[in-house]
Amino acid sequence: MAVEDKKRIERYVPADIEPKWEREWAASGLHNTPDESDRPNFYFLTMFPYPSGDIHVGHWYAFAPADCAARHLRMRGYNVLFPMGFDAFGINAENAAIDRKIHPAVWTEKNMAHMRDQFRRMGAAIDWRREVITCYPEFYRWNQWMFLKFLEKGLAYRAEAPVNWCPRDETVLANEQVIAGRCERCDTPVVKRQMTQWFFRITAYADELLRFDEVDWPERVRVMQTNWIGRSEGADIAFPVEGESGEEIRVFTTRPDTIYGATFMVLAPEHPLVAKITAPSRRAEVDRYVERARNMEEIERTAAERVRTGVDTGAFARNVFTGERIPIWIADYVLQTYGTGAIMAVPGHDERDFDFAKRHGLEIREVISPDGIEQGSLSAPYLGEGRMVRSGPFSGTPTADGRRAVAEEAKRRGIGGPSVTYRLRDWLISRQRYWGTPIPVVYCDTDGAVPVRYEDLPIALPRDVEFTGRGGSPLAHVPSFVNTTCPKCGGPARRDIDTMDTFVDSSWYMYRYLDPKFAAAFMDKDLGRKWLPVHQYTGGIEHAILHLLYMRFVCKALRDLGELWFDEPALRLRNQGTIIFGGRKMSKSRGNVQTPDEYVAIYGADTLRLFLMFLGPWTQGSDWDASGIEGVHRFLNRVWMLGLTDPGAGPRDRAIDRALHRTIAKVTADLETYHFNTAIAAMMELSNALQHASGPSRADAVDKLILLLAPFAPHIAEELWHRRGGTGTVHRQTWPAYDATLAAADEITLVIQIDGKVRERIPAPAGMSIARAEELARANPKVRAALTGRDVDRVVVVPDRIVNIVTRRRS
RNA sequence: GCCGCCGUAGACCAACCGGUAGAGUCAAUCGCCUUAAGAGCGACCAAGUGCGGGUUCGAAUCCCGCCGGCGGCACCA
């Protein structure tokens, strides 16, 4: 390439071409996806953002590769739906209102406007006509509709329960929103409160949620959801309480085979029977203990290494199997929220019970032995399998059989039977906050809790509310909202002043994208039949058990309501890793965001897109370190030069043809598996090779390289496409086909090893037979020299790769 | 404590089913070219794959045990 040529070529100035094409694409509606076309439909969904105000580098990391994958599918011949919206309800908007006196709606709108611009600047191929905004009544009315439907089906209910309360956010939280005893949002230790709240009955789907046979989801997510649901098999057994009351204590145990070793019982301090059964002499101490447990933060109460405290209620129960009377204690190591809130304590075969019994002088009895022979006394609980001992008629029974037999016996006696318990709790959806969906229920003195009529939806969130940050649900202070009439009796009634968890919004938003304006239902079913279920979903791993579990539940619930016809909302899931900066996940609330704007200004959006995809495997995440950004920018510069330079004349270049077709194969395969980093490396390799090539092979390769690059760096690809005489848009072109014959090597390097050590490398034609390869190896002078004085034991040949000659010393 | 993933040049990362440890990038070093300034081009340096065993003709890759990092679950009966 002559120097003069280079001089004449215009420089690559992203700022001059990127906004130009973004305007052009918007004007021509390039990204608007028709619902019907001659191509197969493909629904590519990526998790929508919370409108915090800025699309930061962490967002780019999530969205740019997803956009790339969606663009690739378009070029592969699919009619791809790639929508975007905003998860626009939530506590941050409200906190902004409290801190800065801006109305949440205004704050949210402003943020969305800015973020939409940033999405455009990224070059994302979003069909904005379908934008979903969850804080608009035309969206959230369908939350209310679903709530009412769930209510009819028994999938929504109101109950008093110990709930997680975040003192800082002043609201209750779902179990899924409590991470290690702390509020998922603000990290404040959570406390338990007894409150009457609304729940969605996700537990009704516990078993179905454990099945993943219809979906291609990462193992990691499946394991996390499975752990979270926490299914355990065992038995329910009732223990009658001694005395007149006729009460009984139901327990759940996974070890019914140990029942003869149940020497005492433990109730959770919150257990409803505690007040009833406590002996008068023990009352004061029990009340004190209950009170203390109630005020304890969850984090403290569930800390793994703590002294197991508890108090005796003075009451006794009868172990029906042994006929003995056993004391009933209360202790906070038993959780009201798991199983029945009560346990039969088997200190001989449970670590916690053992520890508790030692501490409080309770009897420890051996009823399981590894070999069926009693040890006499236990210095530690025996947790393993073996045979039942000192267990009446069951003595000698192997533990596995014993579990079944005891459960069956309990059933025969009418005091229980086999049962299954889950760790999963029902989804608490009430929130004592303003910026969310009003719960469509009113309370009437005559009729109690009454659902709002469907025709009265939406129950709109009132605009004028005072944000003090104190004193419970802000809606309580809006008389015009609270005071209403009862749909049943027409009398005065009060509206529910809580709003719904914002995870309700995101549990079904993917259906709304199809037509966010559709007024007759939450979704236009005709469109649903064209697009659903979602073919590909991408998003952060942090939603593995929150959003992704709720979304599956709502899908199944809507299916059972006759509204959907599939079992899983998203068939294929891929999670990007997390971008770490300053040792933590990048997020606005943590105050460690890196803004993409300065990089976009200097290098352009294409460079930043490419750089983020080049950092490493997408699913793995990465530390943010911008020092390598020059490298990908140089690459784009090189492509620019290649695109605008005369390739010169010459013969076809077999090596270049081969390099091209290998690159096509590699990039195509890598895009399918989301290995963006290696796809980019392959394109870099090709562009490096093209520097030294000329003629028609180079011209072809440059053409194809621009197509390969188009999903990654849409602006520069479009500019080069046009400068090279292309018409229409590069993004509607067909993805280059890969020719295996052209990609195949015709010459290989045959490596010759002797006893596993490389001794020689010889160039050879590809496709040699095993015999020929061995012959070639043995004929090599170096090899012959090395073999003198040794006998050949065997020869291992890997075609086109290696010949390993294994020898032994001649004896 | 239990379960899972990951440890490869100074840094980020490749290496299909076990078959030449290096594709790509940054940084370092040395050049070339151009310069008002971006920039461009080339060369070169660099690890034997966290540690210790094992299987194998052959191990970064498979197995076992440690060490380190990350994530999930965790008083769940």
Image (spheres, coloured by chain):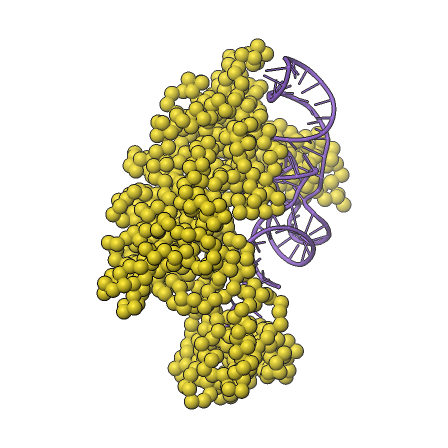
Chain colours: A yellow, B purple
Q: Is residue A584 left or right of residue A542?
A: right
Depth check: give the residue in front, A743 or A102. Answer: A102
- Report the residue at 45% width, 79% height from top: A273
Q: Quadrant of residue A292?
A: bottom right
Residue drawn at x 62%, y 28% is A763
In this rendering, the answer to whether A252 lies above or below B23 is below
Q: Please, is residue A502 above or below residue A809 in the view?
A: below
Q: Position of residue A297 (x, y in %)?
A: 55, 65
At 44% from the left edge and 59% from the top edge, which residue is drawn? Answer: A472
Q: Position of residue A8 (x, y in %)?
A: 54, 12
Is residue A202 visible from the viewing direction of this image? no
Q: Provide residue A364's location: percent of width, then percent of height.
A: 60, 82
Q: Who is closer to the viewer here, A536 or A493?
A: A493
Which one is in front, A16 or A437? A437
Q: Nearer the viewer, residue A517 or A402?
A: A517
In the picture as drawn, the residue positioned furthest to the top comes out as: A4
Quadrant, the C terminus of chain A: top right
- Quarter placement of the N terminus of chain A: top right
Task: Tell me, yes or no, if residue A279 can be seen here.
Answer: yes
Residue at (28% x, 53% y) in the render? A457
Answer with the quarter of the image where residue A153 lies.
bottom left
Q: Position of residue A251 (x, y in %)?
A: 46, 76
Q: How many marks?
A: 0
